[in-house]
Image (cartoon, rainbow, N blue to C red):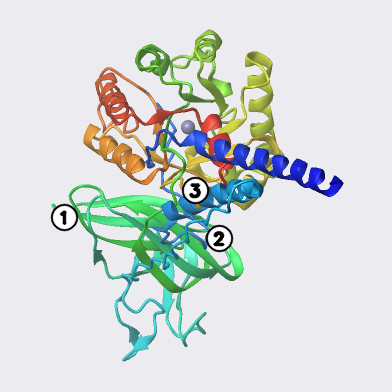
Amino acid sequence: MKQFRLLAVLVALVGLIGVWAISSSDTPKDKNKDTQTSDQKQNDNDKDADTDSQTAVEGDTTTGSTSSTSTSNGTTNGQNNFVVRSASANTTPPVTPPTPVPQPPVTYPNLVENPSAEAEAGAPSGWLQGGWGTNDRTFSYDQPGRSGGRSLSVSITSHTDGDAKWYFAPVALESGKLYRYSDWYKSDVDTQLLAVVEMADGTIAYYQLGTAFASSDWKQATGSFMMPAGAVSATVFHTLAKVGTLHIDDVSLTEYHPAPLQRALVSLTFDDTLASVYNNALPLLNQYGYSSTQYILTGTIDQPDSMTADMIQAFKDQGHEIAAHTVTHTDLTTLDEASVDAELGGAQADLQTEFGTDAATSFASPYGAYNEAVLAQIKAYYASHRSVDTGLNTLDDFDPYNIKVQNVLATTTPEEVQAWVDQAVATNTWLVLVYHGVEDSVDPAVNPYATTPIDLEAHLNAIEASGVSVVTVGEAVAEITAQQ
Ligand SMILES: [Zn+2]
């Protein structure tokens, strides 16, 4: 009898937990939209050259091709249901749970010919050597490989500018699809991934995918990109742009079907504290009811063409996120540790003193420039880091310290932004748009990073029409982290 009561209590408890698990996992599901990222650059009147790119970088093994992702959500819910039913099975006949149908892992073929770069007739077939600028570069393919007998190596022994790389012959890809690149590499300096996309009209578009930190052991570098409208083929450069040596092997390029977030998200971010953003963007953002993230350069507050403290306060009062972008907008990879610390800690202290302790939890690096040491320092102060690396923020590949973006440039068309939004909605990912100035008249040759209010309104229209949720960077990071 006593045992029976105990059992009943246990059953009730398990039932409660099961119900809670179901409601908590179901709640956030209502809106399934998605986003994708994009990127842009930086601008400003003088120095900003934030380059963009997309994230790529190290370490990711997982993602790849999980088109089974949506299934994994389904499976999780199924298990929750099963817990509840078995808990109440004392009073009602046991309900046979539906037999889970095993989903075979979906794999997508590697589109790179000769991905391990084995030599044929003295040279690796399908591989090309590239480089530009003033540097002494040498190529070889007779090194020990990570797999097979060979890998690809490039060395630079003196460097003024430019880069050097091995790259696979461009392959035909489909517009509107996502692709994921990976390779294994060793290098004694930081290197970069760059997607190189050929358009039907013969022009080339470049998307910086991220930084691969120096590694003496074989390490994986990854990046993803969307083939834009009008694109026909692509390759990926893993570039060496300083004195050093880079080895790569086991290269892969496949279709990418990211694991979906519970809902698609879009964030609107603005860099550099420009007064034009207050004058021309804030009224539009408020009209649409969208909260932005303002990456503030504290050293320019109250300077000509920059926002005043009152303008920044107005953003905060109207629900926008006040984030940090250093004090002086210096490339952090060029500074010593104490100077980096002063840029990071100084900007945060200034912003929190002026705008409250909920300000300055998100950070964006000037010019999108970072390295492993700088990143470690950023982590000591901030909850997230946004560069200008282009790419997707996906559930299977999410790093709050490597937030990928799409950069909105003066030359970016509303159709491109629409395509990024559509992609985010279709894949349930997080799209982060990077803006700089919002100026009535924009000459791309003079201010390549500015946007007009007309274009911004077109972007906001596309976002509104898609129904996707617009959140600040801080909100998105919290929401996605909770799903990991
Ligand atoms: Zn900037």
Q: Residue 202 got which mark?
A: 1
Q: Residue at x 22, y 57 (%)?
A: 174
Q: Residue at x 37, y 12 (%)?
A: 283
Q: Residue 56 got which mark?
A: none
Q: Residue furthest front?
A: 1
Q: Is residue 6 above or below residue 119?
A: above
Q: Residue furthest right?
A: 2
Labelled pair 2, 3 in contact (Cβ < 8 Å): no
Q: Amino acid at mark 2?
A: Gly
Query: Who is closer to the viewer here, 467 or 276?
Result: 467
Query: Who is closer to the viewer here, 169 or 320?
Result: 320
Does 61 sit left or right of 35 as displayed? right
Which residue position holds label 3? 395
Q: CA distance from mark 2 to mark 3?
A: 15 Å
Residue 17, percent across and down? 67, 40
Does 172 sit left or right of 159 as displayed? left
Instruction: Say which label, 3 or 1, has the lower sequence index.
Output: 1
